[in-house]
C-alpha cells in the first residue's frame, strides 16, 4: 500500500475513513447486545408422560429405551435424564459448541422414533416432544392476584391461554414456559373400598374414560345412497369430549345382565382441579405463577426485554380484576450496568490517551491526527464484528478499551516522524513522503506483531476459547484497521495540517521538556552502565528471577 498515493490525494484518503466510520455505525445498530458471548452448548430436550407411573417405572419403561438409541448422534457430548413421581420424563442432550441445533433436533427425533415400539402405548398416545431448549434465561415474569378465588390454577391457565403465545411470537424470544403452572384437569379421586366391592379396577376406569371422552365422526344424513327425493345432506353432531364433572360422574364403568350399572361417580370423586400439584411457585411469601422467557441465539437482549415489557404492559388491559404482574428477575439490568461501566471506561481511556499524546507532541495539530485515527479504527471494528457474528458484550468492549492504547501507536509513529522532518526544514507534503518511506515497513511490522500476540487466543479450544475468541479478534480487527488508517489517513492529514513550529516554548513546556530530558539522560546513562557490566547484570537478573519463581 503506497502512502504517496494518499498524500497526493487527501480527499480520497478521507473518504475511505468516512466510509469505514459509516459502515461501522450502521453495523453498530444491528449488532446484538448481551452480557457475555454465546458460549453455552446447544441443548435438545425430549419429554414424555406416563400417567400414574412412579419415577422408577418411568425410568425403566420410558427413559431407558430412548437412552439406548441416543449414542451415535453427531456431536453429542452427553445426555442426562430425570424421571419424577408424577410420571414425567425429561432427557436433555447437550451438543458441542457450534453444532447446528436444527440438525441435532432432527437426528434426536429420528432416534426417539426408533424407541417408540418399545414404549408403553399410553406414553405414545400422550405424545413425545423433542424440542430445542434455549439455555439463556432472559427474564422471569410473576403473575399474582389479590382475589382469593383466583388461585394459581386460574392464573396458570390464564397465562397459557392469553399470555404465553403472545410472548413467544415476539422477535428475539427463544421460548416461554410456565414454571409452577397447574393446567386445568378433571381429577378422578378413586375410592379403593367401593372399587373392591364392585369389582372395578383402575384400568377399567382408565379405559372407560379414554373410550367415552373423545371426539368421533357421527356421519351425515341424506348421503348417497339416499331415498328418492332427498334434497339435503345434514351432518350429525354429537357430544364429544366432556367438560363438566357431572358428565364424568355419569359415565358407565360396568353394566350387568340384570340392567344394573356402575357409574364413575359411585367409585370415584370427580372434581375440576390442576393436572399436578407437585410444583408451586411463591414469591414474597405469596403464591405466584412464573413465566420464564428465554433469549434466542444472536438476539439483542436489551431490545427483546423491551418488547416483553411493552407486550406485558399492553396485556394488562385484558387482565381480570385483581390480577397483576411483576418482573422479579431481569438479566438485562446486569447487562445495562456492565456495558455502561465499560463504555464509561472506554471514554475515559480515549480522553487519557489524547491528553498523553498532547503532552508529548505539544501541538494540537499533531494531537488531532491520533485523536481522529483512534475513533476510525474502533468504529470500523463494529463492521468486522457483524461479519463474524459477534455481539456487543463485556469482553468485546473490554477488548476495545485495551485497543485504544494500542491503535494509537501507529498514528503516533507516523505523526512524530513527519513532525521531525518538518522541523528539519522540509515542506509538510515532502516531509510526509520522507517519513512514510521510513516508517511504512515498521508500521506494517507493528500491526503484524500485535496481531500475532492476540490472534492465537482465538484458537483456544473448549469454552475458554469460545469465551475469549471475540475478545482477541476484536483487538486484532482494531489493530489491523489502525494500520490501514496509519498508512492512508494519517499521512494525508499530516501533509494538510502540520506546520513548522514558529513560536518559542512557553514556560510549562520548557520545564516539562527539561525534566523529560533529564529523565532520558539518566535512563541512557543507566543502560550504558548495565552494558558495561553485562555479566553482573545478568547475574542480578537471574537471582531476581529465582526469587520471583520461589514466591
Image (cartoon, rainbow, N blue to C red):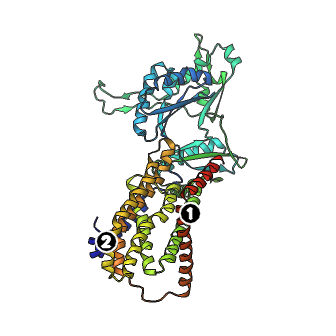
Classify mark 1: residues with Cα within 10 Å, few (<14), some (14-19) or many (20+): few
Mark 2 neighbour class, 10 Å CA radius: few under 14, some 14 to 19, many 20 or more = many
User: Which residue corresponds to the image point at 56% horizontal and 67% vertical from the top-left?
Assistant: 526
User: Label for residue 307?
Assistant: none
- Residue located beneath label 2 in the image: 13
> In this orientation, does residue 505 appear?
yes
Separation of residues labelled 1 and 2 (CA atoms): 33 Å
Question: Is 150 rendered above or below residue 66?
Answer: below
Residue 510 image offset from top left, x and y in percent: 54, 84
Q: Nearer the viewer, residue 525 or 328?
A: 525
Q: Is residue 500 above or below residue 249?
A: below
**Residue, disc 1:** 340
Q: What x and y, as percent, mark residue 210?
A: 53, 24
Residue for point 43% across, 51% down: 455
Q: Is residue 166 visible?
A: no
The image quadrant of residue 253 is top right
Residue 6 vs residue 72, the one in the foreground: 6
The N terminus, quarter of image: bottom left
Q: Nearer the viewer, residue 353 or 173?
A: 353
Image location of residue 161, percent across then percent down:
53, 45
Q: Which of the 4 image quadrants contains residue 236?
A: top left
Counting residues from the start of the chain, the first of labels 1 and 2 encountered is 2
The secondary element bearing badge 2 is classed as helix
Number of marks in picture:
2
Would residue 270 be found to the left or right of residue 375 on screen?
right
Q: Name the secondary structure under disc 1.
A: helix
Amino acid at each position: 500500500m503506497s502512502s504517496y498515493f494518499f498524500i497526493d490525494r487527501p480527499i480520497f484518503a478521507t473518504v475511505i475513513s468516512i466510509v469505514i466510520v459509516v459502515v461501522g455505525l450502521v453495523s453498530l445498530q444491528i449488532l446484538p447486545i448481551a452480557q457475555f458471548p454465546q458460549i453455552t452448548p446447544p441443548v435438545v430436550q425430549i419429554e414424555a408422560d406416563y400417567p400414574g407411573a412412579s419415577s422408577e417405572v418411568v425410568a425403566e419403561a420410558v427413559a431407558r429405551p430412548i437412552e439406548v438409541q441416543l449414542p451415535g448422534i453427531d456431536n453429542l457430548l452427553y445426555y442426562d435424564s430425570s424421571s419424577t413421581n408424577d410420571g414425567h420424563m425429561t432427557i436433555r442432550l447437550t451438543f458441542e459448541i457450534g453444532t447446528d441445533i436444527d440438525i441435532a433436533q432432527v437426528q434426536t427425533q429420528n432416534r426417539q422414533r426408533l424407541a417408540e415400539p418399545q414404549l408403553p402405548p399410553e406414553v405414545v398416545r400422550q405424545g413425545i416432544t423433542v424440542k430445542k431448549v434455549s439455555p439463556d434465561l432472559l427474564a422471569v415474569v410473576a403473575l399474582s392476584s389479590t382475589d382469593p378465588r383466583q388461585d394459581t390454577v386460574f392464573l396458570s391457565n390464564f397465562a397459557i391461554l392469553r399470555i404465553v403465545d403472545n410472548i413467544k411470537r415476539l422477535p428475539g424470544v427463544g421460548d416461554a414456559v410456565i414454571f409452577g403452572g397447574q393446567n386445568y384437569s378433571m381429577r378422578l379421586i378413586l375410592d379403593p373400598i367401593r372399587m373392591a366391592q364392585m369389582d372395578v379396577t383402575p384400568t377399567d376406569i382408565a379405559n372407560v374414560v379414554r373410550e367415552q371422552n373423545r371426539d368421533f365422526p357421527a356421519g351425515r344424513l341424506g348421503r348417497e345412497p339416499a331415498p328418492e327425493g332427498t334434497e339435503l345432506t345434514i351432518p350429525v353432531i354429537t357430544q364429544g369430549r366432556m367438560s363438566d364433572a357431572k358428565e364424568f360422574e355419569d359415565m358407565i364403568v360396568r353394566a350387568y345382565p340384570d340392567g344394573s350399572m356402575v357409574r364413575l361417580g359411585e367409585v370415584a370423586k370427580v372434581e375440576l382441579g390442576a393436572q399436578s400439584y407437585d410444583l408451586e411457585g411463591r414469591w414474597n411469601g405469596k403464591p405466584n405463577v412464573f413465566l420464564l422467557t428465554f433469549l434466542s441465539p444472536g438476539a439483542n437482549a436489551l431490545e427483546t426485554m423491551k418488547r416483553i415489557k411493552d407486550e406485558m404492559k399492553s396485556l394488562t388491559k385484558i387482565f381480570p380484576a385483581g390480577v397483576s404482574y411483576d418482573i422479579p428477575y431481569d438479566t438485562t439490568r446486569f447487562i445495562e450496568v456492565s456495558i455502561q461501566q465499560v463504555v464509561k471506561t472506554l471514554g475515559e481511556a480515549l480522553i487519557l490517551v489524547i491528553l498523553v499524546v498532547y503532552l508529548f507532541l505539544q501541538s494540537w495539530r499533531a494531537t488531532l491526527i491520533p485523536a481522529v485515527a483512534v475513533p476510525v479504527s474502533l468504529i470500523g471494528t463494529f463492521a468486522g464484528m457483524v461479519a463474524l457474528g459477534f455481539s456487543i458484550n463485556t469482553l468485546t468492549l473490554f477488548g476495545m478499551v485495551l485497543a485504544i492504547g494500542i491503535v494509537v501507536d501507529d498514528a503516533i509513529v507516523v505523526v512524530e516522524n513527519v513532525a521531525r522532518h518538518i522541523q528539519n526544514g522540509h515542506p509538510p507534503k515532502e516531509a510526509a513522503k520522507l517519513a512514510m518511506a521510513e516508517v511504512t515497513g515498521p508500521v506494517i511490522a507493528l500491526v503484524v506483531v500485535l496481531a500475532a500476540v492476540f490472534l492465537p487466543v482465538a484458537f483456544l479450544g473448549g469454552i475458554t476459547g469460545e469465551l475469549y475468541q471475540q475478545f482477541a479478534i476484536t483487538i486484532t480487527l482494531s489493530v489491523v484497521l489502525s494500520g490501514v488508517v496509519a498508512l492512508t489517513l494519517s499521512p494525508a492529514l499530516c501533509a494538510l495540517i502540520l506546520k513548522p513550529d514558529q513560536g518559542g516554548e512557553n514556560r510549562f513546556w520548557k520545564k516539562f521538556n527539561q525534566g523529560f530530558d533529564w529523565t532520558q539522560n539518566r535512563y541512557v546513562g543507566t543502560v550504558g552502565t548495565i552494558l558495561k557490566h553485562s555479566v553482573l547484570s545478568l547475574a542480578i537478573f537471574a537471582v531476581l528471577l529465582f526469587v520471583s519463581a520461589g514466591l
